[in-house]
Image (spheres, rainbow, N blue to C red):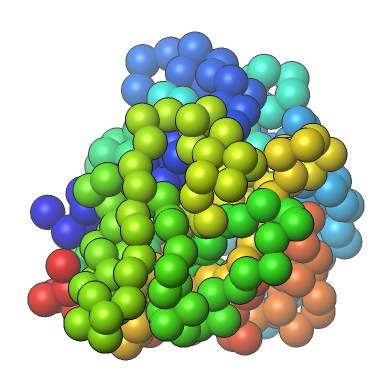
Amino acid sequence: MRTLTLRTRFRRGLTAGTAVVTLAAGLAACGGTSDAATTTENAASGTVAVGQLSNGAARQTTLKVSEVKSISAELPAALRRRGTLQIGVGALPSGLPPLAYVGGDQKTLTGAEPDLGRLVAAVLGLKPEVRNSTWENLFVGLDSGKVDIAFSNVTDTEERKRKYEFASYREDNLAFEVPKQSTWNFDGDYENLAGKTVSVGSGTNQERILLGWKAKLAKEGKKLTVKYFQDNNSLHLALAGGRIDAYLGPNPSIAYHITQGAHTPRATRNAGTLSGAGETLQGLIAATSKKDSGLAKPVTDAINHLIENGQYAQWLAAWNLSNEAVAKSETNPPGLPLDNS
């Protein structure tokens, strides 16, 4: 149930925060039945194009990344001999911009997640092969060995650690979206929501957090109004027209919508982030591989190499996700506890 709740949280928030879903509509057709494979750059070239074919969602940046022998030596011998890294992404049928979706050529999988997979493969000296599937088949692929590792917005949880191992690479954050001209900021304090009207997706984790704050404020004699909208256009019209003060949703989807609307009369900005795990734990997004596969440690080291050499920051900046940066990647860091609802 928790896995489905976490996934539903992202999907619903993404629906509410994305204005141009049609960019990814061709993904289902590209996938055929349930999954599709796209072979990308050869790591031997020493370059990875980040933000390629992004339809304006990213600033395309070419990064020089070469194999680090001391890290690739940590890989399981069978993987080194094969020479490829099979990267799983669970973005079928309609895509998850800006994380994973079909690019401007209507066939190539682009997005922040496959881009990081390609960068990690380059450090490991492996040729990346990105396999796109539904969310459910992503884990089937890991279990069966069809894919080696998933870069697909997977939250690190203690429940998932029963079957998988992790290498963290992004904070799992929610964000407040406000009109660009608004002077309001969350500043990490729910008290700043007093007197405000905020929209949120029904049945999501962010709704649970927001309603908890509403109850706290009510006990203090303060009012927080929560409103719901059935579609993206109604939500953003309300935001632009001042009928709501802010929208609370997943940070990546809000980053995407901010980018898409930057040069329109309805331009918005990010007014502050918070952990998707709530107030007591910083949630983490992590590369996910089968337990005891031997991949978590070399992938962690590869991500830390990218952090230390600046390519990690360039990758996040290209996708407007710098506010989800981690100081370092960790192997199997503390995840959402088993009793987290």
**Residue 168 position (above or below residue 279):** above
Query: x and y percent of residue 45 in the render?
Result: 85, 50
Query: x and y percent of residue 26 in the render?
Result: 56, 16
Query: x and y percent of residue 245 in the render?
Result: 53, 56
Residue at coordinates 32% horizontally, 77% vertically from top-left?
222
Residue at coordinates 41% horizontally, 50% vertically from top-left?
199
Point out the image quarter for the C terminus: bottom left
Asked if residue 19 lies left or right of residue 174, the reply is: right
Query: x and y percent of residue 248 in the render?
Result: 45, 57
Q: Is residue 114 visible?
A: no
Point out the image quarter for the N terminus: bottom left
Nearer-the-camera pick, 110 or 94:
94
Nearer-the-camera pick, 103 or 149:
103
**Residue 62 position (above or below residue 41):** below
Q: Residue furthest front?
A: 221
Asked if residue 249 lies left or right of residue 162, the reply is: right
Residue at coordinates 48% horizontally, 78% vertically from top-left?
192
Asked if residue 146 lies left or right of residue 131, the reply is: left
Q: Would you identify the image quadrant in which residue 182 lies?
A: bottom right
Asked if residue 195 lies left or right of residue 100, the reply is: left
Q: Is residue 207 visible?
A: yes
Q: How many marks overall?
A: 0
Residue at coordinates 24% horizontally, 76% vertically from top-left?
218
Nearer-the-camera pick, 145 or 133:
133
